[in-house]
């Protein structure tokens, strides 16, 4: 292959948007465009999506405005192409003109990620874009399903596409498989072949080189590998390879500045491979599920791997515990106020006031997390410990776990099935129904999954508390993507509680950024002293 034929299709902002909700700052954009201008091998950049409206917040690089596209176009070299992606699941050929017609003359290439069995739809979508003057790229997903069987791509020979890229969607293919499948695809398709590699098993760049060996002429890459799940082949690695091996021109100063920025972002958004992504790659499982599971932070990496590998019921705890609502506790604790304790820093800041209030008001303490439980271990008031997910692992040894079994202490868990070892077998363990009601439960693979606050409020409801006060639900300042997801879980649970409990006090008594009524623990303590 002539080295000048090898080109890079950088899709950092499009693929990386899965972590930032497709929001990137103007400063980052300018730095990124400067790096792309300075790399001769970068022929195209994919800046984001154009999408019909969604029922969730997604940023400007997902609903790309014309003005932003013009800015990106102006920031590239004249010989570089500007691309966007349309989600094949969201569009039909008759929607194309209304969705992207205003971008004609600014955007050069529209790409679609399509499943192999959707070839006919891909051809129709390509035709609709081609009629408006756009070049078309087709990214054919799930390479692992057609390894060394590229004949499934044959219908795409009729597509008006300028390139077809093979996508290792689950990041589990090997270099030999990639090389051979690309070589076979070249004999079937008239379009140039590209490759989009994911890094689940740390082979994204090796597979990219194998794709070139098989005859691919274009590689999809992202800066520092930023992309969905385990991420992608790294732009800086591919450019360094082309510069050192083939003397392709790269402005390493500008590239270094951009890489440094994305390295800092990685610390916040935490993309990249780990054991769970490796297992999902080898098993051919969707990365989206792994992203969601990791984001809850309620389960250990080992448990996520167990969920991915689960083949039967042998590794799952199906034990049924007594229902909290049907136990003697509502008769003992009912009619008393409950204090639900979270893990926020405000618990430490106001610990003495919270403890005094709990004792003076004869409250039941409900720990949605064991993170702050030790601060209240000296109190004689009833205490309930909610063990969502694998919360028990926060208590690292028998001495710490002893707090769960003192007098007047109770444990609440979610309904089965659960991971083995997530719940102790003891007489003081109870279970509660799913807080949101109904038969549909959140799941982590084979097990049920309730957010910690949901478990706590289901406990409060079961014991018929007369009032519900929250402490330690501070909210998040500089929130990572996982923090944002957890915050949405918490706010959803709080909103449901406000709807259900209009007949009883429900408020945070320590500072919070959540949309919930607030009171002061110190004011309540003052009132309790006069009673």
Image: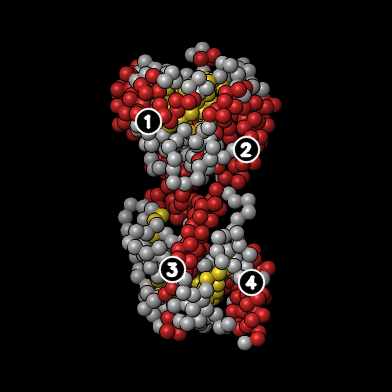
Query: Where does the C terminus fall, quadrant-wise?
Result: bottom right
Q: Give the Cα distance between marks 1 and 3.
A: 42 Å
Element marked by disc 4: loop
Label 3 and label 4: CA atoms lie apart by 23 Å
For marks 2 and 3, the one nearer the N-term is 2
Quarter assignment of residue 34: top right
Residue density around tag 4, few if under 14, some if 14–19, many if 20 or more, within 10 Å: few
Instruction: Identify residue for label 1.
Output: 95
Q: Residue 246: x and y, percent?
A: 58, 16
Q: Which mark is residue 520?
A: 4
Label 1 residue SS: helix
Q: Which residue is mark 2?
A: 25
Q: Are marks 1 and 2 in contact (CB under 8 Å)?
A: no
Q: Which mark is first along the chain, 4 or 3?
A: 3
| Residue linked to disc 3 | 500
Q: Is residue 81 left or right of residue 150?
A: right
Foreground residue among 521 and 210:
521
Residue 456 seen in the current view: yes
Residue found 55% across the figure and 64% down from its top: 516
Q: Distance of mark 4 from mark 2, alpha carbons?
A: 37 Å
Residue 244 at x, y percent in the picture: 62, 20
- Horizontally, is 262 left or right of 170 in the view? right
């Amino acid at each position: 292959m002539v080295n000048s034929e090898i080109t890079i299709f950088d899709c950092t902002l499009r693929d990386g948007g899965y972590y930032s909700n497709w929001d990137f700052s103007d400063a980052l954009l300018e730095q990124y465009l400067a790096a792309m201008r300075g790399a001769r091998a970068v022929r195209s950049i994919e800046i984001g999506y154009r999408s019909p409206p969604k029922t969730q917040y997604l940023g400007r690089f997902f609903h790309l405005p014309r003005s932003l596209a013009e800015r990106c176009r102006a920031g590239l070299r004249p010989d570089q192409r500007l691309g966007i992606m349309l989600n094949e699941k969201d569009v039909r050929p008759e929607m194309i003109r209304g969705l992207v017609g205003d971008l004609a003359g600014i955007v050069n290439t529209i790409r679609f990620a399509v499943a192999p069995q959707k070839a006919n739809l891909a051809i129709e979508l390509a035709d609709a874009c081609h009629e408006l003057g756009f070049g078309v790229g087709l990214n054919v997903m799930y390479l692992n399903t057609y390894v060394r069987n590229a004949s499934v791509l044959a219908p795409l020979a009729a597509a008006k596409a300028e390139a077809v890229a093979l996508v290792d969607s689950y990041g589990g293919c090997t270099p030999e498989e990639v090389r051979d499948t690309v070589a076979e695809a070249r004999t079937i398709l008239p379009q140039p072949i590209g490759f989009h590699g994911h890094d689940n098993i740390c082979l994204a760049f090796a597979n990219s080189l194998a794709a070139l060996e098989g005859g691919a002429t274009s590689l999809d890459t992202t800066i520092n590998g930023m992309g969905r799940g385990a991420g992608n082949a790294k732009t800086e690695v591919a450019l360094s390879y082309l510069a050192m091996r083939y003397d392709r021109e790269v402005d390493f100063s500008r590239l270094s500045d951009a890489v440094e920025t994305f390295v800092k972002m990685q610390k916040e958004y935490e993309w990249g491979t780990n054991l769970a992504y490796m297992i999902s790659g080898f098993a051919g499982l969707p990365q989206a599920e792994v992203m969601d599971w990791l984001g809850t932070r309620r389960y250990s990496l080992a448990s996520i791997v167990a969920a991915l590998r689960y083949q039967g019921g042998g590794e799952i705890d199906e034990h049924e515990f007594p229902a909290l609502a049907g136990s003697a506790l509502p008769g003992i604790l009912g009619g008393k106020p409950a204090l639900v304790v979270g893990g926020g820093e405000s618990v430490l800041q106001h610990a003495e006031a919270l403890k005094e209030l709990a004792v003076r008001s004869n409250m039941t303490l409900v720990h949605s997390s064991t993170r702050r439980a030790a601060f209240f271990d000296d109190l004689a008031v009833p205490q309930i410990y909610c063990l969502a997910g694998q919360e028990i692992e926060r208590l690292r040894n028998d001495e710490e776990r002893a707090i769960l079994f003192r007098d007047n202490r109770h444990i609440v868990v979610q309904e089965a099935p659960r991971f083995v070892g997530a719940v102790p077998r003891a007489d003081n363990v109870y279970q509660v129904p799913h807080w949101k009601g109904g038969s549909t439960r959140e799941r982590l693979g084979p097990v049920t999954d309730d957010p910690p606050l949901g478990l706590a409020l289901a406990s409060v409801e079961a014991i018929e508390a007369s009032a519900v006060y929250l402490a330690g639900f501070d909210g998040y300042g500089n929130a990572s993507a996982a923090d944002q997801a957890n915050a949405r879980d918490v706010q959803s649970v709080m909103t449901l509680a406000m709807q259900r409990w209009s007949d009883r006090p429900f408020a945070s008594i320590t500072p919070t950024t959540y949309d919930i009524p607030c009171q002061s623990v110190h004011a309540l303590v003052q009132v309790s002293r006069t009673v």
